[in-house]
Image (cartoon, rainbow, N blue to C red):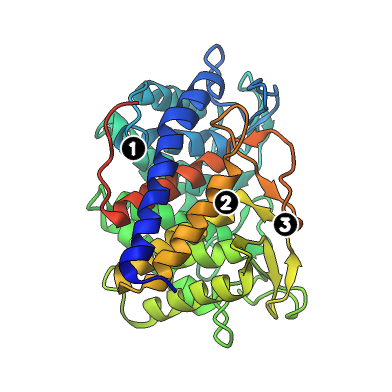
Amino acid sequence: MPGLDSAETDARRAHGRLLHWLRSSAYPLWAQYGVDRPRGGFHERLGGATSPPDEPRRARVQVRQVYAFAQAPALGWSGDAAGIVAGGLEFFLAHYRRPDGLFRTLVAPDGSALDERAFLYDQAFVLLALAESQRVLGPRVDLVAEARALRSALLELLRWHGPGFASGIPDALPLLSNPHMHLLEAALAWMSISEEAAWTTLAEALVGLALDHFIDPASGALYEQFDHQWQPIGNLAVRIVEPGHQFEWAWLLLRWNRAAVGAVRTAAARLIDIGETCGVHAGVTVNALAGDFSVVDAQARLWPQTERLKASARMARLTGDARYWSCAAEAAATLLRYFDTDPPGLWYDRLTPDGQFLPEPAPASSFYHIVCAIAELGTLLGAPTPNGA
């Protein structure tokens, strides 16, 4: 195992390569081809010829792209991030809002409604985008009001009979841990820019829900699906443990508990341990395990690699343990493999167990994961961000 200085240096070198790719290739390409300037909003995918398929647009992709471009100036890209963010929000707020204050899940490229369902998952990303967009747009009372209104709608329309929230309207069940994870992420983003106690109250409740219900007290693993009483669905053989979500929840729990002590720290460390020991194979984080930690999906999507990177880097910074920096450096090196595309700036989404990337358009939804991981690694390394595009 490399020493602390060597492992952290490896992570720092990998961060430099990731940041260079992001600033010189990804942001310019997605700004040019991923933004639908005639009609507004963002395209769902880009192919090898950078020709976007003209297809329905999910709410989550629109607000994730707002998030990704809101980070761009701080990461050294000098393009028109503010204009892209403002345009993306304008399109979204004009075409996705339902009469009840929640946001529908799907519209056509021209903005006409295609699917009126409202998912908790989508609402969480709307809240995140409303907070993070102010990085480039500055403090905006209208965006604060939008977030407050959506928070109120969530509490009125989606709050579950006990703790937590229903999965959506009309599809309330099964109850799901994943949307609550992103709701916690959004609450933390609002806590960083707002003194409203309601955001802290929401975050506290979500952390408590994770510790009390999502995480199995026997194994320490975090499950995905639950019945109406927040009991895991099925036996160990059919329960799903996603390594990427073990890492992602650990990252959020450590952000919540900055002192990194007590039950939250213990739970986060165990989640990382499960991800590393059972979910990482030959340096790659696989998609899914069963409840007994056997592999049930050995393919490896891009996004679990980013979550391993974030969790490992944060635990490395908190503990000073070189092994976590080694894990972060390995995750970063693996992530760079997904970016070896023509033209540069796209990414592969799926890696097969035999080490082959599947040739398919790059999903815009991954940009959120990528940007967040690169930004987080830089923050935890204390790396200066170069100026210029």
What distance separates the C-alpha of mark 3 from that of mark 2?
12 Å
Question: On the image, numbered disc 2 is attached to which residue?
Answer: 303
Instruction: Evaluate if marks 2 and 1 touch, with contact meaning CB atoms under 8 Å apart.
Output: no
* 290 relative position to 110: left or right: right
Q: Residue at x 51, y 58 (%)?
A: 331
What distance separates the C-alpha of mark 2 from that of mark 1?
20 Å
* 105 relative position to 14: left or right: right
Quadrant containing the N terminus is bottom left
- SS of the residue under disc 1: helix
**Above or below, comparing residue 170 to residue 284 in the picture:** above
Q: Earlier in the sequence, mark 2 or mark 1?
A: 1
* Amino acid at dot 3: Gln
Question: On the image, numbered disc 3 is attached to which residue?
Answer: 299
Q: Which mark is residue 75?
A: 1
Q: Residue at x 58, y 84 (%)?
A: 219
Across and down, in percent, residue 79 comes to: 37, 22
- SS of the residue under disc 2: helix
Q: Farthest residue toward the top?
A: 38
* Amino acid at dot 2: Trp
Please name whichever residue, 137 or 155, is drawn nearer the observer in this view of the structure.
137
Q: Residues within 10 Å of mark 2 (few under 14, many from 20)?
A: many
Please name whichever residue, 233 or 245, is drawn nearer the observer in this view of the structure.
245
Based on the displayed image, in which of its 4 quarters is residue 117 positioned? top right
Q: Earlier in the sequence, mark 3 or mark 1?
A: 1
Based on the displayed image, in which of its 4 quarters is residue 122 positioned? top right
